[in-house]
Amino acid sequence: MSPELASAQQIADELLEMPEASAVSLQMSVDNYLDVIRGVVDLFANKKKMDTIYVTATISSEAIKRVLEALDIDSERVFFVDCISHIMMGASTAAQDEKTTLVESPTMLENLMLKVEYLIRRSQSEGKVVVIDSINSLAIHNNNWILSELLHILVSGLRSRDAYTVILTVEEHSTPDISNMVNLVCDHGIHAGKLREG
Amino acid sequence: MPLKPGDRERCATGVEGLDTILYGGIPRTNTVLLTGSCGTGKTSLALEFLIHGAIRGENSLFISVTENSEKLLANIIPYRFFDRTLVRSGRLVFVDMPIMYERLGLTKPDLSMEEIDLLVSALASLAKELGSKRLVIDSITSVCYKLKTSEKIRDFILKLSKALSDLGCTSILVGEVPADSTSYSSFGVEEAIADGIVLMANMERRGDLLRTLQVIKMRGTMHSRAKYVLDLTPMGVLLVPLLKGGSTQ
């Protein structure tokens, strides 16, 4: 990988090498957030034809849908668990529908797990991937103890169902505690941020 | 889950999480008190137990005490697995208790011991006639209001449990308790007689209200005693463990 920020294609290529049902930590920079979304969604939802459950705690599902549309990425197989729109109190137009499930607050981590479970059960697709966007946004609202517990239970459950997990980490907002928490549950790490030299 | 020698046969509730908690399901012929305050999902869980039974070919009977069964069916969660032919074929039967009271002439607000025997006998006859293997009374608390004393409530539940158990029927009695109650039942008797207690509650955590489920007791099986968070979805009741977050409380 070049010392510059990883492109959507490079991210997709690295993800493609991951064995099935892997849990992957994807460390990115705020500057290539859109490339990461593009790389992950396009690879799993379109190239691999997997139902993609996108847990968003950073920006609203409506905003991500607009991004995907602007990038000309088909979102037919993308289902959102939106943890942020409800607490925006009308500032987001995201509404509950077949493709979008709202969680009242990013502090309701059990409900996040329940909505993921619901979508996994409802899915007819053979392969499934759950994208957590991002652990840093969830860390704004929750302490590390409860987040560690969430990741442990969620990732173990998804692994037993042969589903991929991709946990997005924003390197500018990360701490050693958050990195350790993610590394503990993930099998692989992809660094798509500003690569350290040497 | 395969049964070991000596294990009691199970009546799988069909709620995957609950069957895991109970190591396969409710021991067959048990009478379980499903208790909690309003809005905790008791009726939905009880209905799902019956629907899964009916799908498996077990005749199932719902006795509605507080709500007209037509209204109940109209408000049912649009379960993806619920097929109205189960009702039309008689596999899943709804009976309104007020109609039974009227037919039996039990219109007084306070039933005598003889009338309690009559009611137990009528319920058992109905379950026998329909070949019911699963039964729900929603709610037993409303029936108990007609019995007034602890002795009568004890007598009624004991006789009913025995009669249903003798028919090979696994039963859920839905109980109602106030939100701030520390007891598992309104009259303090139901919980002592039931073979099992499943407690549903609303739990507040940092301003969030979570629906929870906990199996307090279940005769005839090991079970988890941990608290779980639940969601009522078109795929049925889903359960996940309550996250503790390092809490010592």
Image: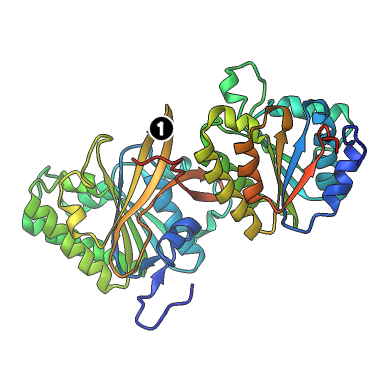
Display coloring: rainbow
Q: Residue at x 36, y 41 (%)?
A: B248
Q: Residue at x 22, y 64 (%)?
A: B161
Q: Estimate the x, y position of residue B190 in percent, counting from the top left.
A: 19, 53
In this figure, which residue is indicated by the disc labeled 1?
B205
Q: Is residue A78 above or below residue A157?
A: above
Task: Looking at the picture, tell me which residue is in the foreground, A190 or A8.
Answer: A190
Q: Mark 1 belongs to which subunit?
A: B
- Res A28 quadrant in image: top right
Quadrant containing the C terminus of chain B in the rendered view = top left
Is A145 placed above or below B236 here? above
Residue B15 pos. (x, y %): 48, 57
Q: Is residue A60 left or right of residue B237?
A: right
Q: How many marks?
A: 1
Please tell me which residue is depicted at 82% across the width and 48% down the height of the picture.
A15
Q: Position of residue B115 (x, y in %)?
A: 11, 56
- Horizontal side of B133 relative to A164 (left or right) equals left
Please say whether residue A13 is visible from this viewpoint: yes
Amino acid on which the number 1 mark rests in the picture: Arg
